[in-house]
Amino acid sequence: MEVIFLGTGTSQGVPIIACDCAVCTSADPRNRRARCSIHVVMGGLHIQVDAAQEFRVQCLRYGVRQLDLFILTHGHADHVSGMDDLRRFCDLRGGRALTVYSNGEGMSRVEAIYPYAILERPVVRGYPAFQLVEMPPAIELEQGTIRSTLLPHGGMNVLGLVFEERGSGAKFVYYTDCKHVTAEALGLAKGAQAVVLDGLRPREHPTHMNIAEAIEAAHQIGAPVTYLTHLTHEIDHDPFEAGLPGGVRLAYDGLKLAL
Ligand SMILES: [Zn+2]
Ligand SMILES: [Zn+2]
Ligand SMILES: [Zn+2]
């Protein structure tokens, strides 16, 4: 299994517009964070999780050329805003709709923002078409299984995702945008080679885990490596990562995992 981090920043991105802080003006490329999404290749199947404002640029930058299915974790702007650019992948699929999995709230956001794309086929070449499907507890594919669980994120629930590749047995967990990792989510994550958790920033936040909460969840899951994502400009990559406990790292844009 291969995972590419297309973006690892919080909803405003890093640098923030008109901010002169040390991180926003840093020369370290790992302090430049587009909004969060990942691209997973499981048994040759290309799965895109979320489409940020930078989705098109991220695809060009990291060589995403194929997309077989799309999963929207939730309907917040930083995860849904790039979906119009999925049009190119409808073209590459020979003008077929792309299957879009989400929860009920995510599906209604997609219907509200992209009513012109809820179609069996694109209207004309170059247009997007989404076939909305409610995310089941597990999608069984010949390449592997994608399990989902609900994570609390303020007033809404976010899809937490667990990928298990059939051929290799590789297991990867992606829990972004959450205030807690529930008991069910902890159970599903057991045995993963790599886990990604919402880490945001050192200070507490009402709808995201802060760094200390994410470290606690990482220890409860006990994976060999946990990457924190959805990071703000309060996190200076190098010095901050040096202070993290063993097995907990910071994700950065362009990071690739081979599991
Ligand atoms: Zn977000
Ligand atoms: Zn800043
Ligand atoms: Zn969110």
Image: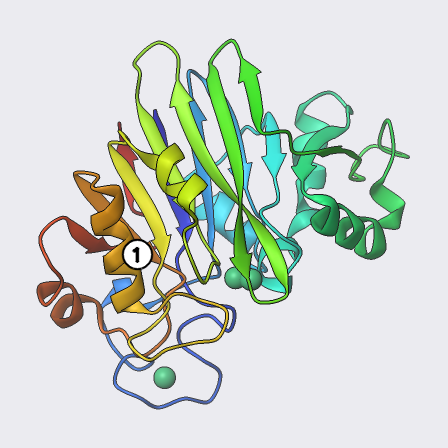
Residue lying at 28% horizontally and 76% vertically, measured from the top left? 202
Residue 251 shows in the view: no
- Is the N terminus in the top left, top right, bottom left or bottom right quadrant? top left
- Display colour scheme: rainbow
Residue 182, how many percent across, how many down? 43, 49
Q: SS at mark 1?
A: strand
* Residue 45 sits above or below residue 181 on the image: above
Would you place residue 49 above or below residue 215 in this image?
Answer: above
* Residue located at (24% from left, 32% from top): 193
Q: Is residue 128 above or below residue 26?
A: above
Q: Amino acid at mark 1?
A: Leu
| Label 1 near ligand 1 (CB < 8 Å) | no
Question: Is residue 136 shown to the viewer in this render?
Answer: yes
Quarter of the image for the C terminus: give it. top left
In this figure, what is the number of numbered marks? 1
The image position of residue 240, as x and y in percent, is 17, 70
Q: In the current view of this chain or complex, which residue is farthest to the front? A: 183
The residue carrying mark 1 is: 228
What residue is shown at x 77% (from left), y 28% (from top)? 97
Q: Position of residue 173 (x, y in %)?
A: 37, 38
Left or right: residue 176 compared with residue 91: left
Please name whichever residue, 25 or 98, is drawn nearer the observer in this view of the structure. Answer: 98
The quarter of the displayed image where residue 216 is located:
bottom left
How many neighbours does mark 1 have within 10 angstroms: few (below 14), some (14-19), or many (20 or more)? Answer: many
Establish if 176 lies above or below 259. below
Dividing the picture into quarters, in which one does residue 243 lie? bottom left
